[in-house]
Amino acid sequence: MKIELRNIHKFFGPVHANNNITLSIPSGSIQGLLGENGAGKSTLMKILSGYLRPDRGEILLDGKPLVLNSPADAIRAGIGMLHQDPLDFPPMKVLDNFMMGYPRGLGLPKREAREALLSLAEQFGFSLDPDAYVDTLTIGERQQLEILRLLWLGAKILIFDEPTTGISAQQKEKLFAALRRLASEGKTIIFVTHKLEEVEVLCDRVAVLRAGKLVGEAYPPYNLDDLVRMMFGKVISKGKRIEIPLGKPVLQVKDLAVEDYRLRIEGVNLEVREGEVIGLAGMEGSGQRHLLRACAGLIRPVGGEIWVDGENMTGKTYHSFLRKGVAYLPADRMKEGLVPGLTLSEHFALAQEQTGFVIDRAAVLKRTEEHIKRFNIRGRPDSTVESLSGGNQQRALLALLRPNLRLILMEHPTRGLDMESAIWVWNTLKERCRQRTAIFFMSSDLEEILHYSDRILVFFGGRVSEPLDARTTTVEQLGQLIGGRGFESQPEAAREVAK
């Protein structure tokens, strides 16, 4: 199915999110859509998938005009979209979510739906339990469920909006293989990303957006510097590693054990010092999140101790950890980090420590405006958080962090961010390190872990490696450990780092 977008315009108040975009995508191709955060990529794809109506312009499907008033219209036309944040119902089971939107609804025999789910999951190499509740899944698993659901609904044009941000390297390889197979079968794939390496290995063609406009198109072999210039108007690089002198211990984990019904990690011993960055690597669901949440007071350990600045915090509440200077940034921005329906100003009012019963709205507005400018958030004080792009939501979360924190715990700190935004985030975090804050983070991006960490812990099925020195560790070594190989034969140098 060939899709054409002609002269598409979309306004959000004074913001011209899509400015006269014309793009033609042939059937059976993998079309990349590249651009910085806030460039208009997601807006354009929401128009194509029926979530938004264009203010001007038209959509043609196989040469015929197509009017989409809802996502249901789009899926009937064969267009499905996987959003950055999966659209699902966490209190319900995987199988019930899989059946959502099917024309026969929940009246469809569950045995038939279960067979379809398991068959599709096997094709993609995904491991999903039909009887598990969605709120027990990782972000990556929830994305996998949505991909399978769209295919089952009969989508022939599939839009993937940053689909690799919550999945492991192994899962990404399986996904890319599946997308190539789908394209070879005549399906049209639109792959929205800000990652140049993904465009290079996957896409047959790429269109680049900047500030709401289509600024160029390219075909293999790609010149990555040219793509960066189109995205940002200049060439950008990560720069050298930032080394910061370490101070006294902030966090001490002693023989820690944490578990849930699926997984148990135990015997974790670690000391994190002022200014230090510890990266956690591993496949989704291997225990990294358990450790972070235990160190934030969000879950209680079943064994061992957690000390912060010399005080035993084991078993204490999240608010006790927060008062001790520990902050937690979750991966799921809209479910756990921000409050849908509230504005940026209202978030800053909630985040700051209250000294009385009355909120000083003028002071809150001033503070919000200052942080919007300082953190380069593309929004206004009265913008609701769900109206912001994923990258701007992440910037807002960072802006909401209180000053003088002792420890910041983060899940996927640059998830969904373009290169320039990711570099800015880490420069901001490293400035916190200079102020004696320690950082403990998990990421599926191995290059990010190696470049910004001082030491690395690798998780595999609840097992935790000895700390590795990030300066002497390679991507290949990390990949081996993530796959479960080499835990018993780690280099002696790595073991010395733990001492």
Image (cartoon, rainbow, N blue to C red):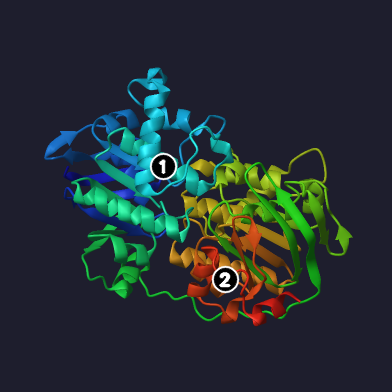
Point 53% across, 70% down: residue: 478
Percent across and percent down for residue 378 are: 48, 53
Q: How many marks?
A: 2
Secondary structure state at the residue bearing disc 2:
loop
Q: Residue furthest left?
A: 63
Q: Along the horizontal axis of the image, is 92 left or right of 28?
A: right
Who's the residue at 70% across and 43% down the image?
350
Residue at (33%, 59%) from the top-left corner? 34
Residue 404 shows in the view: no
Counting from the top left corner in percent of width and height, residue 453 is at 61, 72
Q: For residue 13, which numbered disc appears in the image? A: 1
Q: Earlier in the sequence, mark 2 or mark 1?
A: 1
Q: Nearer the viewer, residue 101 or 402?
A: 101
Residues under labels 2 and 1: Cα distance? 55 Å
Q: Is residue 131 above or below residue 266?
A: above
Q: Which sits in the foreground, 175 or 274? A: 175
Residue 297 in sight from this viewpoint: yes
The residue that mark 2 highlights is 486
User: Which amino acid, by three-letter code, is at mark 1?
Assistant: Gly
* Quadrant in which the C terminus is drawn: bottom right
376 above or below 264? below
- Residue most toward the top? 107
Residue 493's spot in the image, x, y percent?
66, 82
- The answer to whether the residue labelled 2 contacts the one labelled 1, judged by CB atoms less than 8 Å apart, is no
